[in-house]
Image (cartoon, rainbow, N blue to C red):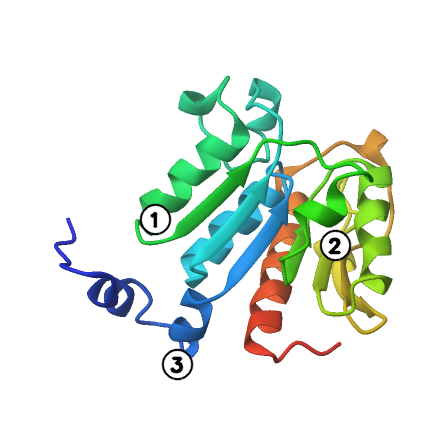
Amino acid sequence: MLNLKNESEFRAEIFARNPRGVSEILSRARVCILGAGGLGSNVAIMLTRAGVGEFFIIDFDIVEASNLNRQHYFLRHLGSPKIEALKEQILGINPYAKVQICGEKITSENVREILRDEKIICECFDGAENKAMIANLAGEFKDKIFICASGMAGLGGANSIQTRKFGANLYLCGDGKSDMSAGLISSRVVTCAAHQANAVIMAILGKFKV
C-alpha cells in the first residue's frame, strides 16, 4: 500500500518511468472525451495511467452486461452511469486527477457550447452520424485538436488500424471502414483506443505529426 503524503510524491512514484519533464506537462493537461464506451472508457484509463491530470467526460448511458466484452467496466458497475463508473476508476488510479463529468446527450444544438472551452477533444462515439458531427467541427474550430475514430470492428488485422491526419487539427484513428455486422471484439476496439490515447499524448506534448 502506497503511503505518499502529497501529490508531488505520488506523481514521482507512480509516473517514475515517464521521460523527464513529461509528467509535469501531462499533469497540467485537460482532455475532453466524448463517449465512455468501448473507445472512451479505454482511452480514459490509458491517459490516466500516462499521467494526464484533468478530464471532461461526456456520456448519458449506463453500464450493461453487453458492454463488458470490450469496455473498461466490471460487474460491480452494471446499472451505473458510465461517467460515474469511469470517474471511480480514474480516481482509483490517480486520486489527484480532476474529473468533470456530464450526462447530457451531445446534439448539433448543444455541441458548440459544451465544447467551447475545450482544447483537446477525443471523439469516442458509436454512431456514424455523431462521429461526423464532431469531425466536421474541426474546420470550424481551428484552435482545437480533434482526435476521432472510424473503423475498429470485426476480426481484421490490427495493423490495418492507423492514425491519419486530415487538415491542420483533425486526426482519425481506425481502418476507415464501418462494418458493424462483423461484431465488436475487444482487441481491435482497444487497439483503436490506444491509437487515440497515443495521439492525445503526442498532441499534449506538441510532438504529433503524421
Which residue is rendered at x = 24% and y = 67% of the image?
Answer: 8
* Residue 10 shows in the view: yes
Residue for point 60% across, 44% down? 40
Reply above or below: 57 against 5.
above
Q: Give whichever of discs 2 and 3 has the lower sequence position.
A: 3
Left or right: 55, with 49 as reference point: right
Residue 110: x and y, percent?
Answer: 75, 40
Q: Position of residue 6 (x, y in %)?
A: 18, 61
The alpha-carbon separation of the residues under discs 2 and 3 comes to 27 Å
Quarter that holds the C terminus = bottom right
Tell me the kind of residue under disc 1: Ile
Q: Nearer the viewer, residue 29 or 180?
A: 29
Please give the label number shown on residue 148.
2
Q: Is the residue under label 1 in contact with that under label 3 (CB below 8 Å)?
A: no
Frontmost residue, 113 versus 162: 113
Residue 73 - label: none
Real-space Cα separation, disc 3 to disc 1, in angstroms: 21 Å
Q: Residue under circle 3?
A: 21
**Which residue carries the number 1 mark?**
93
Contact flag, marks 2 and 3 (Cβ < 8 Å)? no
User: How many residues crowd mark 3 within 10 Å: few (<14), some (14–19), many (20+)?
Assistant: few
Q: Is residue 204 left or right of residue 107?
A: left
Question: Which three-letter amino acid code belongs to the residue tagged 2?
Answer: Cys
Q: Residue 28 occupies which quadrant of the picture? A: bottom left
* Mark 3 residue element: loop
Number of callouts: 3
Position of residue 128 measured from the top left corner of the image (x, y, whole percent): 85, 40
- In this rendering, is residue 31 above or below 99? below
The answer to whether 157 is drawn above or below residue 143 in the figure is: above
Marks 1 and 2, how far apart at CA: 25 Å
The local secondary structure at tag 1 comes to: helix
Residue at 30% from the left image edge and 49% from the top image edge: 95
